[in-house]
Image: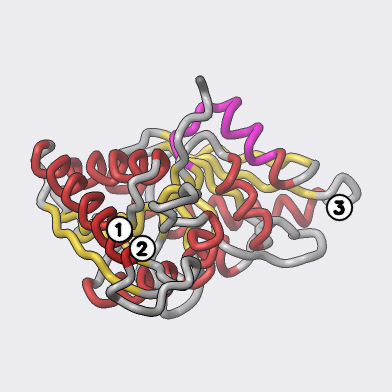
Amino acid sequence: MFERILVPTDGSGPANAALEFAGEIAARERLTVHVLHVIDPDADPDEAGDLLADGREWAGDTDAPVIDEIQTGEPRDAILEYAAEYGVDAIVMGTRGRRGVGRLLLGSVTESVVRDADVPVLVVRGASEVRRRYPFETILVPSDGSDHAEVALERALAIARDLDATVHVLSVVDVTPAGIDDRTDLRLERLEDSAHRVVDEAVAAAEESGVDAVSAVQYGSTDQRIRAYVDDVGADLVVMGTHGRSGLERLLLGSATERVLRTATTPVLTVRASTDD
């Protein structure tokens, strides 16, 4: 699935949850774990070193190769620069952190990394209701047919092939932004047709690649329906594009992805399409 993963840490509960989960994956997949702590230039390096040692212990319990480093600067920039310099395949992050010497994983930092990272970002909440199971058996891919959703589907299918997992493709017809109240409205009919086409094409792609797939079309708020579907099927992982597109197929807004990240009861892997021409 991956060969090298980067885990930024600040010693907070969410960061430790991300480290522990990254360690579980690394132990099974023989991955190298990079543990990074970013501190303010005026911070006490000894205290930062203690936090990094804790992070090393979290990952080291898995017997996976661990590379650790302390850097100073702006957390978002340091994380992205480190990921590029060391060629990591994915970043694993908690959703929030704490202020002070250990300030790193504020929700805004994680979301900024999600938006700007060139590699997939696995977001892990530290809340007690979050299921963190590996290997993944059930993977949910919300899709609106956008380029970003297509890249998310490709990534999900690759993971599913490796782990012999089942992929669920969900398209949510979010009628609220369109101001649709009547189910007979022609605009709703067009949205429904688009949603069904998206999931049918996704299932066909899964079957062609040898992956078992299930499709679903639901109505309501996009992020709420995604969260509910995760619990309904007991998904182990959600794979999402970082934003969708406007117009007829406007289903996976970037804001919806961020809302899912803050409340999901399972880890969320975000990917984005290349911006290269």
Check if residue 83 falls in the magenta segment.
Answer: yes
Q: Quadrant of residue 151?
A: top left
Instruction: State which mark lies toward you, 3 or 2.
Output: 2
Of labels 3 and 1, earlier in sequence is 3
Check if residue 172 falls in the magenta segment.
Answer: no
Secondary structure mostly seen in magenta is helix
**Residue ID for mark 2:** 187
Residue 137 drawn above or below residue 113: below
Q: Quadrant of residue 271?
A: top left
In the structure shown, which secondary structural element does the residue marked by tag 3 occupy? Answer: loop
Q: Which kind of residue does numbered mark 3 sit on?
A: Ala
State the CA–CA distance, disc 3 to disc 2: 56 Å
Q: Is residue 104 visible?
A: yes
In the structure shown, which secondary structural element does the residue marked by tag 1 occupy? Answer: helix
Identity of the residue drawn at 24% across and 57% down? 193
Residue ranking furthest to the right: 42
Tell me whether the residue at label 1 lies in contact with that at label 2, contact meaning CB atoms closer than 8 angstroms.
yes
Quadrant location of the N terminus in the rendered image: top left
Q: Where residue 86 sits: x, y (%)?
A: 55, 27
Identity of the residue drawn at 29% across and 44% down? 153
Q: Which residues are magenta?
A: 78-90
Of labels 3 and 2, earlier in sequence is 3
State the CA–CA distance, disc 3 to disc 1: 56 Å
Q: Where residue 137 sits: x, y (%)?
A: 19, 59
**Residue ID for mark 1:** 190
**Residue ID for mark 3:** 43
